[in-house]
Image (tube, rainbow, N blue to C red):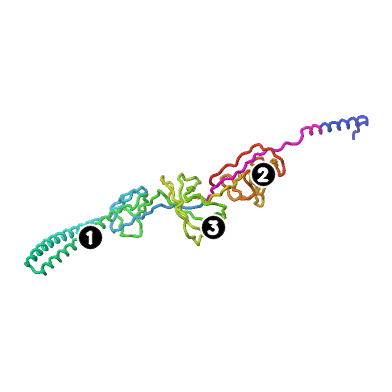
Amino acid sequence: MATFPRSLALPLIAALALAMAGCSKEQGAGGPMPAPAVSVAVLGAQDVTLTRELPGRTSAWLVAEVRPQVSGLVSERLFTEGGLVKEGQPLYQIDDASYRAAANSARAQLARAQATLKTARLTAERVAQLARIDAVSVQDNDNAAAALAQAEADVGVARAALDAANVTLGYARITSPISGRIGRSSVTQGALVTANQPQALATVQQLDPIYVDLTQSSTELLELRRSLAEGRLTRGDETMPVTILLEDGSTFPHEGALKFSEVSVDPSTGSFALRIEVPNPDQLLMPGMYVRAVLGAGVRSNAVLVPQRAVARDPKGGTSVMVVDASDVIEQRSVVVSRTIGDQWLVESGLAAGERVVIAGLQKIAPGAKVEIAESVNAAPVGRE
């Protein structure tokens, strides 16, 4: 092992000590570390309309199943399957030869009854004139008057028979009971149909407007009523528009309105029905489609919202935020949040309007640390959930 002479070792140790001292002075020359910079959001209080998203399916506003009212062979189909039809538009023509013949026979019976009535009226008038001069007996006069009354009744019966025959003849031409879009035909030309048969010939549905039938849990209704009773919520406008979300997540361009809610709960599901009426001018919504509806549940007055990015969760599910106090010192605060509204949480407890919560720079801070405010913004106002 090499050794240094004693005369060289002492100067070397002194030089090393001076170098270390110089480094210590240089390190201390910079002073204390600067406070970390953070961005904060200043919380505010606002009235927020809380909403509920419910699943549902669409159903036609009007549905009419077309069935024949007389029997016969279909001689012609008068519409295009899947097209739009108007109320009263002919759809099918049934062979009406027998019904037309019956109508002609009833018309002839009416003409015969009218001729008999004319004869009876003339006879009654002549007998009445002769009775005034006692040229005929009272019995003959009464018989002539009775024959006239019977002839008048026969005309009424014949006229009613003709009306019935014309109605039956009219049933041979099947028309649309409503305006709407018609589906496919279940029969073709030449098919035999019977009066009031169970199978519909076609179905016409009116799709503008259209209904959206929803179901809501009775427990949610109880919670809503409890919140209203306790004053935590106030009831919003009953005519508040309803937003419809399509199956692909997009928003339907027309808003609906709540028409009614069922007064009884389905015991098998524990839910009750709601019906929404939605304008459907482009007929984008078709019966049977699955949709979701966003309905207003109530208004929370002076609600406090906190940005979602400011809220942290611990392994036990607890939520907390970092609050900057009046001295710019960090305080970790436990909070209770209930639901998301846009990109913010609705605060139930733990925060108040006017407090500042850290939204950026969280990785650089700890409770008790003094910070520097780099940016301060107001929490974004939200009108509806």
Three-letter amino acid code at the position of disc 3: Leu
Could you tell me which residue is drawn at 64 percent across and 40 percent down?
40
Magenta segment:
24-52
Indicate which disc residue 111 carries. none
Secondary structure under tag 2 reads: strand
Secondary structure under tag 1 reads: helix
Secondary structure under tag 3 reads: helix
- Mark in the foreground, 3 or 1: 3
Could you tell me which residue is drawn at 63 percent across and 38 percent down?
376
Q: In 3D space, how far apart are the residues under numbered discs 1 and 2 (Cα atoms)? A: 90 Å
Could you tell me which residue is drawn at 69 percent across and 43 percent down?
330
Three-letter amino acid code at the position of disc 2: Val
Residue 182 shown in magenta: no
Where is residue 196? Give x, y as percent.
32, 60
Q: In 3D space, how far apart are the residues under numbered discs 2 and 3 (Cα atoms)? A: 35 Å
Residue that carries the numbered disc 3 in the rendered image: 222
Task: Say which of 34 and 126 sits in front.
Answer: 126
Q: Residues within 10 Å of mark 2 (few under 14, many from 20)?
A: many
Where is residue 337? Give x, y as percent.
61, 50
Looking at the image, residue 89 sits to the left or right of residue 304; the answer is left
Q: In 3D space, how far apart are the residues under numbered discs 3 and 1 (Cα atoms)? A: 61 Å
Quadrant where the N terminus lies?
top right
Q: Are marks 1 and 2 in contact (CB under 8 Å)?
A: no
Q: Residues within 10 Å of mark 3 (few under 14, many from 20)?
A: few
Residue that carries the numbered disc 1 in the rendered image: 160
Three-letter amino acid code at the position of disc 1: Ala
Q: Residues within 10 Å of mark 1 (few under 14, many from 20)?
A: some
